[in-house]
Image (spheres, rainbow, N blue to C red):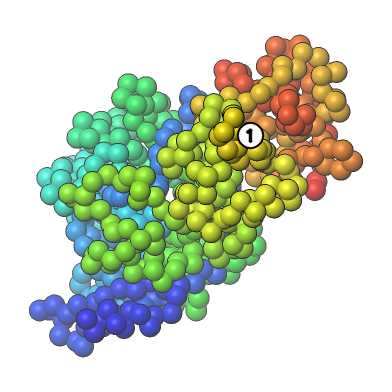
Amino acid sequence: MRCLRILDFLSIPAIATLAVATAQHHEPFEYITAVNRTLPIQLRASPLCGDFSSSSFTEVNTGVTLNATKTIVAFGDSWTSNGSNGTIPFAPIVFPPNPSAGARAGNNFRARASNGYVWVEDLANTVGAKLLDYSVGGAVVDLSAWNSTNKGVTFTSDNLLRTDFVTETALFLQQGHLLADLNPDTTLYTVQFGMIFDFNQYSIAGGDWDVASSSFLAQIGILQANGAKNFLIHWVYFQENVTNAFQNTVHQGLQAAHAQNGTNFATVDLANLFTAIQASPIEWGYTNTTCLVSQNFTDFGCDDPDRSIFYIPSHPSATTHEIMNQYTILTIEMEQSIPVTPQSEQSVKSRKKSGKPKPDGSKKAGPSSAPRTNTQRSEKLRGNPARDSPEVRLSKTLSWLLRHGAQSEGLPMRPDGYVLVVDLLANPKLKDLTLETLQEIVKNDSKQRYDLIFEKGVEAEAGVWCIKANQGHSLKSVKLDLQPVLSIADIPTGVAVHGTTKDAWVSISTQGLKRMKRNHIHLAQGVGGGNVISGMRGSSQILIFLDVQRAIDDAMELSLQRAMSMVFYRPNISQELKRRKGCLSLDGRRAER
């Protein structure tokens, strides 16, 4: 009880950990230790989402849902390992001269190759999931793939036994089902290999990447056969021909698994993230590339490891791991804003094993707990509480419910997209919203996102208020009132434009404009001003103008939303807006905002 009382006085944001003395350690450290983790680095990169049907690896999500995740099972090398080997990890505290968080003299095996939590721990902490981490430092996909490791027992530079994905999977199958509630629908499996160790072993003495890719996919198949339905794959953080080819082969194997079994895959390309960091580290807040000169001691290091990209050579600092976590979440849930930092006091407490309430008031589900029902829905608003005002978070929550979340939140919605206001206000997330406030939100929305109407009752029945989002739905049940565009004259302004960011433009300029998780591609009649209501995001830096006549000539299915006369859609998902079809006007008609 003394330790729990101390926890109440920890400054937030912080990472709270409990260090308990053992028979080997008699030093007086039976107390709560807080590691300050205010984040000096800000995420400044966006995913380059691609097409899962592509022959090349990309960033994509076929259905992984973080909000449903209760357990994370991790496989990988030292970029993912917390030293626990599927058990309970040591607290992420650095005890000099040993630089590894959680390690003391002689126990490097139970250490992190960083100065704090690794990315998968940050991910588990963010979504409130239990973590089983089977990753081991120095691991490769398959020891038999490399000439330097296929001739018997080999060791890492720390003189530890080198292992592989094959061994990690086998260990998990031996003990994993006894350690966690592995409900297939709420368990996420993360896999991260090839970062440095596969490539290094290949560089030392050569090997066979085909063996590595076949073994990688074989382990995915074994996990699928044992109930795995949701996977998160990290692609390596650098670009090399051999690793690119390896990842292309794995990507194609994931396509086959998804087609055959319906398995969900989310893939994150860390090369996109680290390329952006290394292109302008100062803008991100970094002041140093690598903090320590060696993985073996803390001497000859920097004064501020949290502002270093790497903590020890080729291994991210704790802040970079958190940035990796944020980037991963952004890739998986582009339309959902999950608060990742700073973390609230309640969220830190909720990770404790005591079953204390989570921020939504519920208790963490155990092995015998029933699945979450509608009565257990979270009351948390969308958005980042550290960045967004309560009004902005309320608006984001309203937009998310009406465009994406009605089904998952148990909110009845008509085929035309309308919901009863009385049902909307009953949602726990909107418990503080009133009809009057809702009317003000709709009235003052400069982009006309919503349509709020009063439907008169029949005879003695009272009328009811209804509301819908005007565009941007991912819900397949919504059928909007659309008018086909058969000629350029059907568009009052004759203009169709899409706003995007510079980061997204890198992908769009080569792969085309895609609907992603939405039902349609959203275009506007102009960029705002006069009688034109744009509807595009204020963060848009690049304006992409559609050559409407050529699109019509190429049988591109365009529609105009009748009620708004401002938004265009392309409902045929077999088509994409691509430069080679002449549907994008890319002849210098870009504009900075």
Location of residue 459 in the rendering, given as x and y in whole percent from the top left corner: 59, 30
How many marks the image carries: the answer is: 1
| Residue 112 position by quadrant | bottom left
Q: Nearer the viewer, residue 65 or 285?
A: 65
Q: Nearer the viewer, residue 368 or 253?
A: 368
Location of residue 400 in the rendering, given as x and y in whole percent from the top left corner: 55, 44
Q: Nearer the viewer, residue 134 or 427?
A: 427
What residue lies at 21% left-to-right and 53% top-to-bottom?
366
Residue reaching furthest right?
A: 530
From the viewer's perspective, tell me whether residue 352 is left or right of residue 576.
Answer: left
Residue reaching furthest front?
A: 460
What residue lies at 17% left-to-right and 49% top-to-bottom?
368
Q: Is residue 101 above or below residue 542?
A: below
Q: Is residue 514 above or below residue 326?
A: above
Residue 214 shows up from this direction: yes
Q: Nearer the viewer, residue 473 or 222?
A: 473
Neighbours of disc 1 within 10 Å: few (<14), some (14-19), many (20+) = few
What residue lies at 30% left-to-right and 73% top-to-bottom?
17
Residue 325 shows up from this direction: no
From the viewer's perspective, tell me whether residue 487 is left or right of residue 434.
Answer: right
Location of residue 45 in the rendering, given as x and y in whole percent from the top left corner: 59, 51
Q: Is residue 255 above or below residue 93?
A: above
For numbered disc 1, what is the local secondary structure? strand
What residue lies at 69% left-to-right and 52% top-to-bottom?
440
Q: Which residue is mark 1?
A: 455
Amino acid at circle 1: Glu
Quarter of the figure with the N terminus: bottom left
Residue reaching furthest left?
A: 23
Location of residue 280 in the rendering, given as x and y in whole percent from the top left corner: 64, 58
